């Protein structure tokens, strides 16, 4: 299946659902930022705003029983894989109703029922988990696929190369999704990453591709091909998604002038916004009208509002549970 064919075969229902899901992620992250600013959320969080097309494009090509592992910038991955807004907010606020009973927080959400094996605050830390899950699938003879999301900063972590080596040797059904948002925290990736990124997975004999991470249809098309390949025994793949985070490295990183320009930020927001690009395409294809898109946003806002209200009213864990789930 070619990328062109993948785009052409994208049905109206899925195309509209992609827009809805990206909108939901955008609004969730905006509300998470507001929770931090109003001192209602403990700790920091790392916003996914600007990168929504990657999570939605990738997860739209997966089944519920397929696995994902995530990174510290993982709210979008969780929601794209089917997580509930209310339980997500509850986890951010440390409430009992959260996915990890309030003990994981922003950077450690897991949703096993939807195949989300968890986010990880260690850079590149989830690459081993995804590779192990893929080994499990092959050992048990299922056709499940594991997808690992990580930022380009993980290209400096040795674990990534160890697991890519094993995945290639054992022909494991795992896809490594590198979200290159241009900055390793506060340093442009070109100042920290030598050579061509795709040369790294190719050195292990891994199928490696590059895609516009702001184009949800392109991400979906490439992922669908790689997932089908992995299910059929074709082995691991590496998908480099070029994208941009609109906000800082974390919610406390508000003064970014010392490492990137306002002109650069404005350019990505005005010309490369994934929601605007997909919304325009939907209108051009006569799959949606401006009113349809507006109603989609209003429905997403209502879902965010209801989820937030649920989380704010939910109780905190009982103090007696403080030593539960502690294994070290």
Image (tube, rainbow, N blue to C red):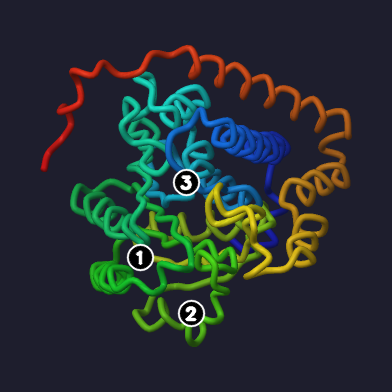
Upstream in sequence: badge 2 or badge 1: 2
Q: Compare residues 194 and 82 and report the one nearer the observer.
A: 194
Q: Tell me the distance, in whole angstroms, between the alpha carbons under discs 1 and 3.
A: 25 Å
* 68, above or below 88, in the image: below
Residue designated by label 3: 74
* 175, above or below 24, in the image: below
- Locate residue 63: give its quadrant: top left
Please identify, in this view, whether the residue under mark 3 or under mark 2 is nearer the observer: 2
Please identify, in this view, whether the residue under mark 1 or under mark 3 is nearer the observer: 3
Determine the residue positioned at 53% across, 39% down: 80
Please identify, in this view, whether the residue under mark 2 or under mark 1 is nearer the observer: 2
Q: How many numbered tags mark residues here?
A: 3
- On the rendered image, what quadrant is the N terminus found in? bottom right
Q: Compare residues 109 and 31 and report the one nearer the observer.
A: 31
Circle 3 Cα neighbour tier, 10 Å, few/some/many (<14 / 14–19 / ≥20): many
Q: Tell me the distance, in whole angstroms, between the alpha carbons under discs 3 and 2.
A: 23 Å
Residue designated by label 2: 192
Determine the residue positioned at 37% across, 49% down: 69
Q: Tell me the distance, in whole angstroms, between the alpha carbons under discs 2 and 1.
A: 29 Å
Residue 165: give its label: none
Residue 235: give its label: 1
């Amino acid at each position: 299946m070619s990328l062109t064919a993948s785009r052409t075969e994208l049905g109206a229902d899925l195309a509209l659902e992609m827009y809805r899901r990206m909108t939901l992620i955008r609004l969730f992250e905006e509300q998470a930022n507001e929770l931090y600013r109003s001192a209602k959320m403990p700790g920091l969080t790392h916003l996914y705003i600007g990168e929504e097309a990657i999570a939605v494009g990738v997860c739209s090509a997966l089944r519920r029983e397929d696995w994902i592992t995530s990174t510290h910038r993982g709210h979008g991955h969780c929601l794209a894989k089917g997580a509930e807004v209310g339980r997500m907010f509850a986890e951010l606020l440390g409430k009992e109703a959260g996915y990890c009973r309030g003990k994981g927080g922003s950077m450690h959400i897991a949703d096993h029922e939807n195949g989300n094996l968890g986010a990880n605050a260690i850079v590149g830390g989830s690459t081993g988990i995804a590779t192990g899950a893929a080994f499990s699938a092959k050992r048990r003879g299922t056709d499940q696929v594991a997808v690992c999301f990580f930022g380009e900063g993980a290209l400096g972590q040795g674990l990534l190369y160890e697991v890519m080596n094993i995945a290639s040797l054992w022909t494991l059904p795992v896809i490594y999704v590198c979200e290159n948002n241009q900055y390793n925290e506060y340093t442009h990736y070109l100042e920290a990453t030598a050579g061509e990124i795709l040369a790294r997975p190719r050195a292990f004999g891994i199928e490696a591709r590059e895609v516009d991470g702001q184009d949800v249809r392109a991400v979906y098309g490439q992922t669908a091909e790689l997932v089908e390949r992995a299910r059929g025994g074709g082995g691991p793949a590496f998908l480099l998604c070029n994208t941009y985070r609109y906000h800082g490295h974390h919610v406390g990183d508000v003064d970014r002038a010392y490492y990137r320009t306002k002109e650069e930020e404005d350019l990505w927001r005005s010309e490369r916004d994934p929601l605007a690009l997909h919304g325009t395409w939907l209108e051009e294809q006569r799959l949606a009208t401006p009113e349809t898109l507006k109603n989609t946003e209003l429905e997403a806002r209502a879902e965010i509002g209801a989820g937030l209200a649920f989380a704010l009213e939910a109780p905190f864990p009982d103090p007696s549970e403080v030593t539960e789930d502690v294994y070290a």
